[in-house]
Amino acid sequence: MLSVYQEFGDIPLQVDRAFWKKSVGGKAFFLSQLYQSGLPVPAGIILRTCPDSAAAWQEIIEWWRREAQPAVAVRSSAADEDSQDLSFAGQYKTFLNISGEDDLRSAVTKCFASIGQANGVAYREHFGDRTPATRDGAAMNVVIQKMIAPLSAGVYFTTDPTNSEAGWLIEWVDGLGDTLVSGERTPRRVRRENAADSAIAHVLLPVIERIERLLQFPVDVEWAIDSDGQPWILQARPITTQPSVRKTSRTMEKEIARLTRRNTAATLWDGHAFAEWSGIPSELSFSIWARAFSSRGALGEALRSFGYLGTGSKRPGSSALERVLGRPYVNQRRMDELLFGASPFATNPLPRPHLTIARDRLTAQTLLHAPMAAFYMARAAWRASGSNHALLSACRDAYSRELQADQLPNDPSVYQAESAPALLLQLEHASHDFADRLLKWPLVLILLIESSTERLRQLLAKSAPPDQIDALLQRSLGNALNSATLEMDRQYQIACYNAAARSNYLRQYGHRAIGELDLARPRRIERGDRAFAVPRKGSLSQRARAIQRRPTTEDTADLDHISRFYRPLYVQESARLREMLSLRESWKHLVMRPYAHLRWMALEIGRRTGLNDRVFDLRARELRQAALGPAAIPRLSRLAELRFDRRQSLRDVHLPMIVTLDALGSLNEGATPADAASSRILYGQALSPGLVCGEVRVVRHPEEVSSVDWPEDTILVAEATDPGWTALFLRVRGIVLERGGVLSHCAIVAREMRLPAVSGVLNCCEKLKDGQKIWVDGNRGHVQPA
């Protein structure tokens, strides 16, 4: 009869190592490998299924008795845990100092059940396709291992996870190490440069060197030293993230030098147009949108529809859209060229967009063009005004025509039968059609919306207090707004609760995606059932009612803030704006379908050429070179890898909505764009690299917090965190803590999720306030007001 468990020495590592690693999970696999190599690993057994009979439990109890009934640790070893990509640090259950039969049964059962707990599910949802399917119990294994009574316990890293150039790092606390990895205690630490004076390093390093020689990859090792001075290895796993601060700095220097060469000192960049674009866009995606924001593209056509010049620079490839440290920003000087031509007029986006005279553009030629530019501006303003509905009617008519012509299926496999030359040509033509024609009327609509919003602000400013204008505007537009997006959200909630509704949802909305502006992101139809989140508490009818809001008496009450003379104008304009907002969402839903088809064409090209996902780091016209045959693929692959590496090195750098060259220079010199007075800086320890500016949310009890209304740039501030906070991590851009080491669960998960994080900031929950804007510098361990 097969045993219900296997001892560390029983795993046949010499036969099909990949199979056994997947079968027993990374934790059990590496412990078995170290144990069989003679390293000091406490004895233990591996359970691949939860015992379901008295006989099975008795077999485990008998092993425990043969070992003299020591206190044991019961730990998870899931199939997706402790891989080279993801650690799942703290996402599953661990139980220490188990010393009774009933407690042992309970701990094993709970450990197997933890595969389905909420924070682990949230972690898997965040990393999506990087994690294997782990919904069923067969993917969970459990390790039962003898406990060590330690004098000291801690963690060793081959290289500092926050700076790969800094060498190895040891952190430890007295007693059990669980308070270190949980973040409850800030540990002591030793590095390579001060190892000679460390008794801990003297005892531990000889064992660590053996592990590194055996495993042949950078390791994260949990260890303990007992009262006899004997070191024990409790866990070893690959380091999942090793970002290079130096590489990021070098890339930033090159990017800032490029921007300085191509732009004047007065240039600023505005990120509001692409505020919903998460992460750094792939090259294929960015090249399409950059073409759309050129004079020959959809934006130029949209501006000419209003009566603007819409000419801009004549340089080939010139676009108002530019990468700033990898991210999409509108170059305001180039946008002004599209709007006003060769005139001295300019747009200043701060504090709100307004027209100015740019002194650096005052020349005889620009002054000569100023009257004509002023005429074009006046004509554009009249066409955008509420008294003229021609452009809005044209937007409606164009939408109806496109809707009737839309015959594209939600089917990623539709291009598999196309010949390679035809597919390459089709991708280039379709991307040009999207950027030049299809986006024109959605952009016209966006310009109309901006104009209408500004008119409402002006009406509110005539009678409402300045500090209430934004709140009044948001309330009046939020209620009674029914759009394609709201309907999509409603159908999504239904599909989360009802699996039978998912196929219909994917037929209608399968071309949409999280982060859908980037073609590198998979569409929902590709993810299938994985696209649907685990339902939250609350009935389906409650969720549906929350989405299908209707006007309330609050709308009428808000009108009391507006004088009676302007009230009819406000009601009329706000109704018109709600209509335009709804039409904008319909347009977006429509254009995202052909946009998804650009992704599916690129995927098929990547599959046939062997470029695979790196196809998204090439432009459509570059991909056309693949038609030259296999000889062209290596060069394209090298170019794609170069761009991918550049994106990766900048992925943890986050910028404010408005950026100047001076601010960019200060970023790479080690300061934030805010006033760098030292008294305003809070110093701590860098947990996870990156730089981000965001809005503070102080959290003391996560179970009492609703993150639904948190802004997109939320910075989580807390005394300490544990693995149960993972779901909140999905809603934030950075983390600030009072306690916790660089090897805590929080630090590991933050690095994997690319969240800048700083710990050791004393009294941060009191010093930082909800709503405050701060910079979090995870490279240097600094926090300061923005």
Image: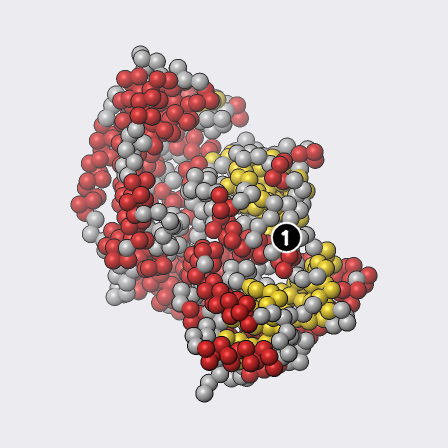
Please give the name of the residue rendered at 29% of the width and 60% of the height, measured from the top-left corner: 412
Please give the name of the residue rendered at 79% of the width and 64% of the height, measured from the top-left corner: 199
- The answer to whether residue 597 is visible is no
For the N terminus, the image quarter is bottom left
Please give the name of the residue rendered at 22% of the width and 38% of the height, measured from the top-left corner: 398
For the C terminus, the image quarter is top right
Counting from the top left corner in percent of width and height, residue 101 is at 55, 72
Counting from the top left corner in percent of width and height, residue 66 is at 61, 82
- The answer to whether residue 312 is visible is yes
Mark 1: give few (<14), some (14-19) or many (20+) Cα within 10 Å: some
Counting from the top left corner in percent of width and height, residue 237 is at 59, 67
Counting from the top left corner in percent of width and height, residue 384 is at 30, 25
Q: Nearer the viewer, residue 250 or 365?
A: 250
Residue 302 sits in quarter: top left
Q: Nearer the viewer, residue 273 or 778?
A: 778
Q: Which residue is mark 1?
A: 184
Where 21 sits versus 274, above or below?
below
Where 362 sits versus 105, above or below?
above
Q: Nearer the viewer, residue 38 or 252?
A: 38
Please give the name of the residue rendered at 28% of the width and 65% of the height, measured from the top-left corner: 416
Where 563 sits versus 191, above or below?
above
Of helix, strand and loop, which one carries label 1? Answer: loop
Most extreme residue toward the left is 404
Q: Nearer the viewer, residue 366 or 507?
A: 507
The amino acid on which the numbered mark 1 sits, given as a three-letter code, is: Glu
Query: In the visual, does 736 lie left or right of 732?
Result: right
Query: In the visual, does 235 lie left or right of 596?
Result: right
Most extreme residue toward the right is 197
